Amino acid sequence: MTQKKQILGHPVGLYVLFFTEMWERFSFYGMRGILILFLVASTKGTNPGYGWLEKDALQLYGIYTFLVYLSSVPGGIIADKWLGQKKAVLIGGALLVIGHSILATQLLWAFYTGLAFIVAGVGMLKSNISTMVGGLYAVGDDRRDQGFSIFYIGINIGAFAAAIVVGYVGEVYSWHYGFGLAGIGMAIGLLIFIVGQKHLQGTGDSHKKHTAIQSAAQSMSLTKIDKDRIVVMLISFLLVIAFWAAYEQAGGLMNLYADQKTDRTIALFKATIPASWFQSVTAFFIVTLGAPVAAFWYRWKKNGKESSSIFKMAIGMIIMGWGFLFMVAASFQFQSDGASSMYWLILAYLFHTIGELCASPVALSYITKLAPLKYASSMMGLYFAATGLGNYVASWVGIWSQSAGELQIFLGIAIFSTLLGLLIIAILKPLKRLAHAAE
Ligand code: GLN
């Protein structure tokens, strides 16, 4: 629904969702950033952890990042069938505050309970708030992609701040203070969402509240066009799984590479950059490059060039894949010099980010364009489940690199991503026909 009041050419509601999601991601990435470190930290000392083996911690991490997105499927269905997205986001936010607060306590039983609350909370919130962004724009409104790019910048401001603040407080003071801080962040997000309700009228309501015309449309069963579009979405999910399986090497393989094989010293300051700081590089690039990349595609479209979402996603896949070529170069340098320059990592992350900006916000926008209203949240839930599956595959690729060799894995990902992107571009026409030119 188009709202009357606007800021920077977008409905005010977009900024309510922006700040809510910014704080939700602050809590999510803050907690995720210290989870592994907490699990492997020794049980003794001033800031004790659980003293787990690295492989056990990585395994729990892989399962957690999978479940946390898989839960978007029931979250989406519940919103579509009963609650509407608005109520689902409220409940999700509350579950997240509870989950993080439980982790802030030091009780052992509380650990898994806290994680379970977070999985359920993200499931109710993440996909539904994304669907709500789409609900702010009428069918055919060409600001939709840009709206999602702005929303995506909010996500990454939260992620960037979390890596610095929660990481620091958790590592230096107490893991539990870090978890608590994540909880406070989510509470602020929830408050913003509640206070901003008046700007969200007409979006994210339960289907029962829709107007007579809309409810008539709701009750109709799926048309052939709807079914075709669902098929296109499912095909694009294959790209999504592959994209995140490659991209999410950032937290595992590339994180370890930064830690163990990269020269992180800055001679001028006689200082060494902590490996964990490299985790905030992509979020930083997204915040700085989000607007230029969105503006680029906007102009591209205005010039009448190919700018369908699937095309942008395929280009994003290729650009992200090329980032791994810098890691191949880094591996060669490591083999000859015993350490590789950190600039390779930064260049790799730069390409990953540009690829992500072409693919990820666009995919969110695309789903809100294509999914039948009745199943909007469920399709968004499936999308996030696909990203979760990508995360899970990423952890296996990381483990695989230990036997295959990381240079081979980096090169393999670059080639695979390029070929997959080109394949999608090659079959673009039939795909677009199947989507019945939704854009
Ligand atoms: N980094 C993005 C976010 O946190 C995308 C995550 C995803 O799609 N799985 O929203």
Image (spheres, rainbow, N blue to C red):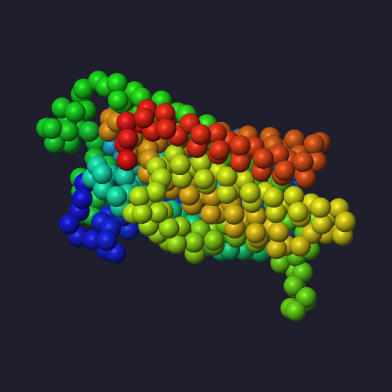
311 and 382: which one is in front?
311
Which residue is located at x 61 percent, y 37 percent?
419
Residue 260: x and y in percent read 79, 55
Depth check: give the residue in front, 424 or 368.
424
Q: Residue furthest bottom?
A: 268
Which image quarter is the C terminus in? Answer: top left
Residue lying furthest left: 212
Q: Residue at x 48, y 31 (%)?
A: 427
Q: Nearer the viewer, residue 360 or 129?
A: 360
Coordinates of residue 287 in the picture (x, y in percent): 48, 62
Can residue 120 be spotted in the picture?
A: no
Which x, y percent locates residue 206?
A: 24, 36
Residue 261 is situated, as x and y percent measured from the top left of the image, at 80, 55
- Which residue is painted at 21% across and 22% down in the image? 220
Residue 87 in the figure: left or right of residue 330: left
| In this picture, residue 305 sits left or right of residue 224 | right
Q: Is residue 268 above or below residue 303?
A: below
Tell me what residue is drawn at x 59 percent, y 52 percent: 352
For this view, does 317 lie left or right of residue 312? Answer: right
Question: Is residue 307 something that shows in the picture?
Answer: yes
Tell me where residue 404 sits by quadrant. top right
Name the one closer to the observer, 329 or 429. 429
Residue 20's quadrant in the figure?
Answer: bottom left
